[in-house]
Amino acid sequence: MTTTAPRGLTIIGAGLAGSLLAILLARQGWRITVYERRGDPRIADYESGRSINLALAERGRNALRQAGVEEAVMAKAVMMRGRMVHPRHGTPELQRYGRDDSEVIWSVHRAELNVTLLQLAEAAGARFHFHRRLHTVDFDAGYARFIDDRDDSPHDTHFDTPLVGADGAGSALRAAMNRKSPLGERTEFLDHSYKELEIPPHADGRFQIEANALHIWPRGRYMCIALPNDEGTFTVTLFLPNDGEPSFANVRSGAEAQALFEREFADAVPLIPDLRRDWEQHPPGLLGTLYLDRWHQGGKAVLIGDAAHAMVPFHGQGMNCAFEDCVFLADALAANADPAQAFALFERERKPNAAAIQQMALDNYIEMRDQVADPAFLLQRELEQA
Ligand code: FAD
């Protein structure tokens, strides 16, 4: 028997993985509905004007290529041909990743990338509902409750399709699945956190430091990195222990942060004019690894990206891995009429891969933490292998 009715899928989360999966499936003719907690990023600036970026490696580019969106994304990417290591004293030195520019990684602006993917998904036919935070799911009755965080109003929605949890590390769909049938969930947090700062461009819009490099200030148990954005800024990320000296426990005020930078990252200080203000306004981010025994609940629900396997960022691979998930899941759904089989195949194939990358990222963190000699090398080695 053949059917002309399109198959449907409901995706929770219009982030990087949710939007890419929506493109892939909508183009295959699926009826795709996406619910997103935040407002439409094309209307509201959902990161309060902050530029956050990510390293895109061949693994992720390959997934974008298969989804037919590589060109649109790469138009705004900044090439990083090597690491620019900033020693405590002396001149920064560029260490190329490869012989030539065929071996490079790319810096992509998270918000711009998200908007690009979202637009392509909508153009492919996916329907997006913003300001809809998944709250609870009644899998048996086929109802999901969403909350509009602007006024706390509940919105109960009937669904007759499988659900895909692309709602990130704190996934509400995962919590709902776990309540129905335990997933064997555990999260291990690191004793380091991170804080993001910004290097603005020169008055004429030019980058203040070498644009085509991933800048690193390696300092043993802690370090700074800076990735370029296409508008001339750099996003600076400081990784610092939660306790000890120095740590987030004793570097609290903007003045204390300024003192830390003057002592440890002196050449970065004149580049970050709003260091004190940004330090006090940006909360530190936690770093952890999420482990699950199961990623799916029969043919009713499945988890992808950070919702399934959040990892520490010392490998620069979370997004790249999430993109690979999308391609694999779309292929599995195309090859299997029964979503339960597709989800089982997806879990079987992707779970060991994600676990391997999670472990490599953790190993790298441990090495970096203890290797005072050159932690930047270790981070970069992993980025290069991506
Ligand atoms: P997310 O990007 O978190 O998207 C989840 C979406 O779901 C969001 O839009 C969110 O608003 C929405 N949502 C959440 N809850 C709900 C709900 N209840 N209902 C509806 N919607 C909801 N990866 C790399 O590949 N390269 C890097 O260089 C890199 N650097 C990183 C640096 C840091 C400091 C960190 C923390 C991570 C880094 N990562 C990097 C990892 C990368 O950010 C993630 O792996 C990636 O964002 C995962 O995409 P996702 O779509 O699964 O989740």
Image (spheres, rainbow, N blue to C red):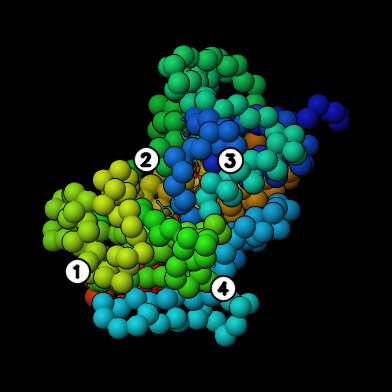
Q: Nearer the viewer, residue 199 or 249?
A: 199
Residue 335 in the image: state x and y as whole percent: 73, 45
Q: Amino acid at mark 2?
A: Glu
Residue 243 seen anywhere in this rendered image of the structure:
no
Residue at point 13% right, 58% down? 244
Residue that mark 1 sits on: 263
Q: Amino acid at mark 1?
A: Arg
Residue 185's tag is 2
Between tags 2 and 1, which lies in front? Answer: 1
Mark 4 vs mark 1: which is more N-terminal?
Answer: 4
Distance Cα–Cα, label 2 vs label 4? 36 Å
Distance Cα–Cα, label 2 vs label 3? 21 Å
Q: Nearer the viewer, residue 201 or 37?
A: 201
Residue that mark 4 sits on: 104
Between tags 4 and 3, which lies in front? Answer: 4
Residue at point 71% right, 58% down? 71
Residue at point 26% right, 52% down? 276
Residue that mark 3 sits on: 18
Between tags 3 and 1, which lies in front? Answer: 1
Q: Secondary structure at mark 2?
A: loop
Distance Cα–Cα, label 4 vs label 3? 26 Å
Mark 2 vs mark 4: which is more N-terminal?
Answer: 4
Quarter containing the N terminus: top right
Between tags 2 and 4, which lies in front? Answer: 4
Q: Nearer the viewer, residue 225 or 375?
A: 225
Distance Cα–Cα, label 2 vs label 1? 41 Å
Q: Amino acid at mark 4?
A: Val
